[in-house]
Amino acid sequence: MTTSAPISPIFAAYNFARRLKTLKGLTPYEFICKAWASQPERFKLNPLQQMPGPNI
């Protein structure tokens, strides 16, 4: 077992919730949701249904 195995879920959660300056303070998930709400024609599928859930 490697040492990164127990830490990787922590980094995944941190990166998912991290607010980025380039996205004007939004998380990547919030940015995608906002873009989909304002411009749904840019997406082929509903991005809200494509996000991994807590049971990854």
Image (tube, helix red, strand yellow):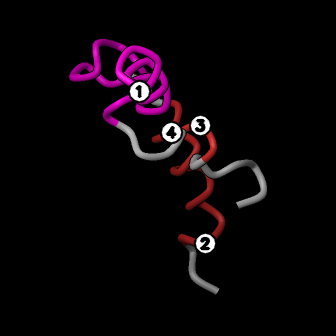
Label 4: few (<14), some or many (≥20) within 10 Å?
Answer: few
Q: Closer to the N terminus: mark 4 or mark 3?
A: 4
Marks 4,3: beta carbons within 8 A: no
Q: Does residue 53 lie above or below 56 as drawn?
A: above
* Label 3: which secondary element: helix
Magenta residues, as a range? 20-42
Given the image, on which type of amino acid does mark 2 rest? Ala
Q: Please give the label number shown on residue 5.
A: 2
Q: Does residue 35 lie above or below 42 as drawn?
A: above
Q: Residue furthest bottom?
A: 1
The residue indicated by pointer 4 is: 16
Marks 3,1: beta carbons within 8 A: no
Q: Residue furthest left?
A: 22
* Label 4: which secondary element: helix
Q: Please give the label number shown on residue 56.
A: none
Question: Does residue 25 show up magenta in the picture?
Answer: yes
